[in-house]
Image: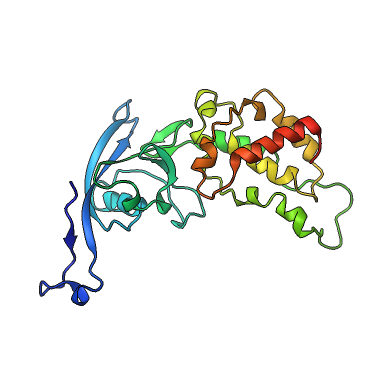
Amino acid sequence: MSTPTLEKDPAGAPQDGGATAIEKITVTLRIRRYNPEVNPEPEWVDYQVETDPKERVLDVLHRVKWEQDGTLTFRRSCAHGICGSDAMRINGRNRLACKTLIKDVNPAKPITVEAIKGLPLLKDLVVDMEPFFQSYRDVMPFLITTGNEPTRERLQSSEDRERFDDTTKCILCAACTSSCPVFWTDGQYFGPAAIVNAHRFIFDSRDEGGEQRLEILNEKEGVWRCRTTFNCSEACPRGIEVTKAIQEVKRALITRRF
């Protein structure tokens, strides 16, 4: 059970007369540790950490690494929900550790933290992202045009831009792809993130490679493997309507209109 404590000044009184006193609690962080050089099987390890409930899971992971166990391994970079490098499973759901507050994950009980699923586990919370990025590269996530290099910018109406605006928000964190049951059982499946990034260019009025991308996604491991479970949309930290984007790509394959 968490024990609330107030941060006090050296005289023993709450700081600023209690107006800005910080209530701290002790939480149990239950981390699924894995080091192939020590143990061929992952194991759960508990850490007791004092924290402000308004702090993030990433802050608590830092405290574990810096103050209790320097061998703990995880990825993080910007810590502001932009780089996507700290995607992990927190209490059984894919989230960004830098966007998940302690108070929002029931700190009265142990908070479980483990690596995202479906990708090869390297150590602790770190997975091999190469299969994920290979699928991303395979859908050609760049503007394709023909003819001579333009002498002025390619103009686009607000309506044309809005058509694919949602899928430009992807930060390649792999939270959607690694929440997909199809991806868990079939690592060859392109996965939601690759399809989202293909969507971004398929529906770009300036692009001329839509047919090529559609043919790539029409393959055995393409969009038809999607079972519309909505796990991907729920997991996306950027709020992208991933399932909707996949359905639009399926429709474009059938109608050849995009």
Front-lying residue, 13 or 75: 13
Q: Quadrant of residue 190?
A: top right
Residue at image point 38% right, 44% down = 74
| Residue 175 shows up from this direction | no
x, y (%) of residue 56? 35, 54
Can residue 24 be seen from the camera position used here? Answer: yes
| Identity of the residue drawn at 25% across and 46% down | 69
Left/right of residue 88 with respect to residue 4 in the rendered view = right
Left/right placement of residue 209 relative to residue 81 reads: right
Residue 242 place in picture, x, y as percent: 59, 41
Identify the residue at image location x=59%, y=26%.
Answer: 188
* Residue furthest out toward the right: 147
Q: In this view, does 234 lie to the left or right of 140?
A: left
| Color style of the picture | rainbow
- Residue 210 higher or lower than 120, as above or below: below
Q: Where is residue 139 in the image (x, y as percent from the top left)?
A: 69, 37
**Quarter of the C terminus within the rendering:** top right
For this rendering, which residue is in front, 92 or 217? 92
In this rendering, the answer to whether 258 lies above or below 188 is below
What residue is at 76 percent from the left and 32 percent from the top?
A: 253
x, y percent for residue 40: 33, 25
**Total label count?**
0
Judged from this view, the residue extending furthest toward the left is 11
Going by the image, does 23 lie left or right of 121? left
